[in-house]
Image (tube, helix red, strand yellow):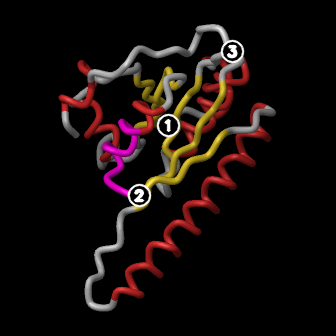
């Protein structure tokens, strides 16, 4: 993640014609569900929008060109399914219909690029892993850049139950 990319144009979340938007990265980690639950509850409570992002890695298969394209298409299809499942869960949790985005690249870079492009994103919601392996690679990666990150990052403890999050969000 390049720190030079961190100087972004100002957020417009609360200007006329804009609404704050919470960004949640959707992946296959256990903690992802905690971040989604918190963000959906909080967005529903404060009238914010919710944006769900899935990032796929570019195909790294050089032997047959068609195989790499097929692998990327399959990954995009799976990302779309994950996003739709997460969107259905957000609707059930808080009655909101989130926006969805699929990007291809390095996860941290794609998060920053999306924040650069959408001036309404005002909060990145992540969840820390509850296991002994630490908080997870995304939290670890972004925590090092937190001091110069362009928006606040909310890190939800992975061990919080729905009732605990309801009381907070």
Residue bearing mark 3: 46
Residue 57 circle label: none
Where is residue 3? Give x, y as percent. 19, 30
| Foreground pick, 20 / 82 | 20
Closer to the chain start, of discs 3 and 1, is 3
Disc 3 to disc 1, C-alpha distance? 24 Å
Tell me whether the residue at label 2 lies in contact with that at label 3, contact meaning CB atoms closer than 8 angstroms.
no
Where is residue 59? Give x, y as percent. 35, 73
Label 3 Cα crowd, 10 Å radius (few <14 / some 14-19 / many 20+): few
SS at mark 2 in the image:
strand
- Is residue 83 on the magenta stretch? no
Disc 2 to disc 1, C-alpha distance? 30 Å
Which residue is located at x 50 percent, y 37 percent?
Answer: 159
User: Which residue is most to the bottom?
Assistant: 64
Judge depth for marks 2 and 1 and give the one in front.
Answer: 2
Closer to the chain start, of discs 2 and 1, is 2
Disc 2 to disc 3, C-alpha distance? 31 Å
Q: Is residue 10 above or below residue 125?
A: above
Closer to the chain start, of discs 2 and 3, is 3
Which residue is located at x 36 percent, y 49 percent?
Answer: 107
What secondary structure characterizes most of the magenta part?
Answer: helix
SS at mark 3 in the image:
helix
Task: Say which quadrant the N terminus sits in.
Answer: top left
Residue bearing mark 2: 104
Label 1 Cα crowd, 10 Å radius (few <14 / some 14-19 / many 20+): some
Q: Is residue 62 above or below residue 5?
A: below
Residue bearing mark 1: 159
SS at mark 1 in the image:
loop
| Foreground pick, 163 / 155 | 155
Which contiguous range is marked in magenta? 105-113
Q: How many marks on residues?
A: 3
């Amino acid at each position: 993640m390049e720190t030079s990319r961190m100087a972004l144009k100002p957020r417009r979340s609360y200007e006329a014609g804009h609404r704050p938007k919470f960004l949640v990265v959707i992946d296959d980690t256990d903690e992802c569900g905690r971040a989604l639950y918190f963000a959906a509850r909080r967005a529903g409570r404060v009238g914010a929008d919710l944006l769900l992002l899935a990032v796929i890695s570019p195909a790294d298969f050089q032997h047959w060109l068609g195989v790499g394209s097929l692998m990327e298409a399959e990954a995009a299809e799976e990302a779309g399914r994950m996003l739709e499942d997460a969107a259905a869960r957000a609707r059930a949790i808080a009655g909101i219909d989130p926006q969805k985005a699929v990007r291809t690249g390095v996860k941290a870079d794609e998060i920053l690029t999306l924040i650069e492009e959408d001036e309404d994103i005002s909060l990145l919601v992540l969840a820390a892993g509850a296991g002994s392996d630490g908080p997870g690679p995304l939290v670890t990666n972004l925590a090092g850049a937190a001091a110069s990150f362009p928006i606040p990052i909310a890190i939800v403890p992975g061990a919080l139950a729905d009732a605990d999050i309801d009381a907070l969000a």
